[in-house]
Amino acid sequence: MFLFRSEKKQMPQLPAVQTIGIRKPDDFPVQLYAYDLFEKVRRTVPIIDAAISKIIRLTGSFQIQCSDPRQQKLLDQFLRDVPVGLTGQSIYAFMDSYLDSLLVFGNAVGEIVFDRECMEIAGLWNGNAADISVRPGASPMERQYFLRTESGERKLLYPERILFSALRPPSGGIYGISLLQGLPAFADILLRIYECIDHNFERAGNIRYAVTYKPSNDPADMAYAKERAETIAKEWSAGMQAARHGEIRDFVSVGDVDIKVIGAESDMPSVEIPVRQILEQIVSKLSVPPFLLGLNWSSTERMSAQQADILTSELEYYRRILEPVICKIARMFLQMHGSAADVSVIWDHINLQDEVELAKARLYHAQAEELEQNQI
């Protein structure tokens, strides 16, 4: 039976980006505005969406080791085949969506769904963090969960089934801080620059011509100036229409005819420096090396290695947040099968470079032991 289901709600439009700056940790109505804003930023700025997707994939896979070897095979089968929502399967699909919500909104919520008839875990459900309100209980370590509905808030009766995580919550606060905190203002400037580029190319990139006929002082030219101008305009329009269909026509005229490109005197403003400065702010906030996002910025080999180390430390931090959630799911499954065994999460190495460094360390350690034995 589902304790809650994630339903998409229509969020009101934000009057300004600065709404995020006045958010308090437990001011939940304002937090709903933040959720809507962060989701829009992620959808409208491709580099932010790409960075979040790469963080989720680079966090890596994991294995759960049970202290009771007899339960290991059953646990592995459950983690591989557990239904997730309406379309997903396996705990890995659940944790990917869980981490996605944690990064974008600063909070992630899920549910362990039970089948009362079979007394089994029926599946896992990724909830919408905006639907759940968290409050302290009778003790400092007790959480109370409330489901937000149109008629008000309803307390959830089985909080032990709820999975909730917060990303870097402030001191004394409950709700976490989104990875995108502070980026909406930069994203707004970046989109405004690209919008101006669109308008500039629409005006200056789509070449338009100014054709000017200047009659001479001859009375005959002055008398038929209007007719000749209309003829020139007609022929010029016909030539431009033919060019759209791949037919090239020459324009022949008699008299003083001046043809200029409209806006040719004005140069297109350079946006390379401001766009790069904004992208640097976005990349530094997301802690993803620029070369992983397709940004060809010059950097030394040592600088690239340091950026990779920083990303590795960030991924290790996300793993520490996810590990209690994974262990809770596994322990609850084992308890439902009458086992009190403990579990531990074994993460895969983040990249091949880590494997090489570990292999070198083992080699150096073996060589040191061999030298010590020879000396003895």
Image (cartoon, rainbow, N blue to C red):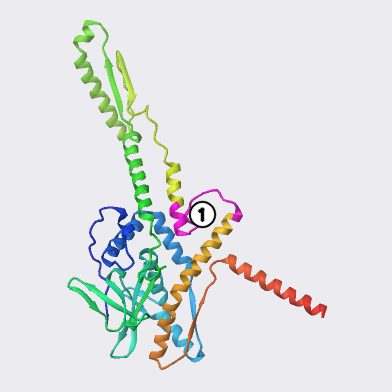
Quarter of the image for the C terminus: give it: bottom right
**Image-quadrant location for residue 40:** bottom left
Give yes or no for residue 286 being in the magenta stretch.
Answer: yes
Q: Position of residue 200 (x, y in %)?
A: 34, 37
In this view of the protein, which residue sits in the foreground, 326 or 94? 326
The quarter of the displayed image where residue 235 is located: top left
Drawn side of residue 82 relative to residue 292, left or right: left
User: Vertically, is 30 above or below 252?
Assistant: below
Q: Secondary structure at mark 1?
A: helix
Q: Which residue is mark 1?
A: 291
Residue pictured at 46% horizontal, 69% vertical: 318
Tell me what residue is drawn at x 49 percent, y 67 percent. 315
Residue furthest right in the image? 375
Please report the residue visible at 31 percent of the width from the left and 32 percent of the height from the top.
Answer: 243
Q: Where is residue 304 shown, x and y percent of the image?
A: 57, 56
Say above or below: 28 vs 73. above
Quick one: quadrant of the N terminus?
bottom left
Instruction: Classify mark 1: residues with Cα within 10 Å, few (<14), some (14-19) or many (20+).
Output: few
Residue at the far left: name it: 151
Say left or right for 376 vs 331: right
Residue 250 spot, x, y in % from top left: 33, 23
* Image x and y of residue 192, in percent: 34, 45
Q: Which kind of residue does numbered mark 1 sit on?
A: Phe
Q: How many marks?
A: 1
**Span of residues in magenta:** 281-302
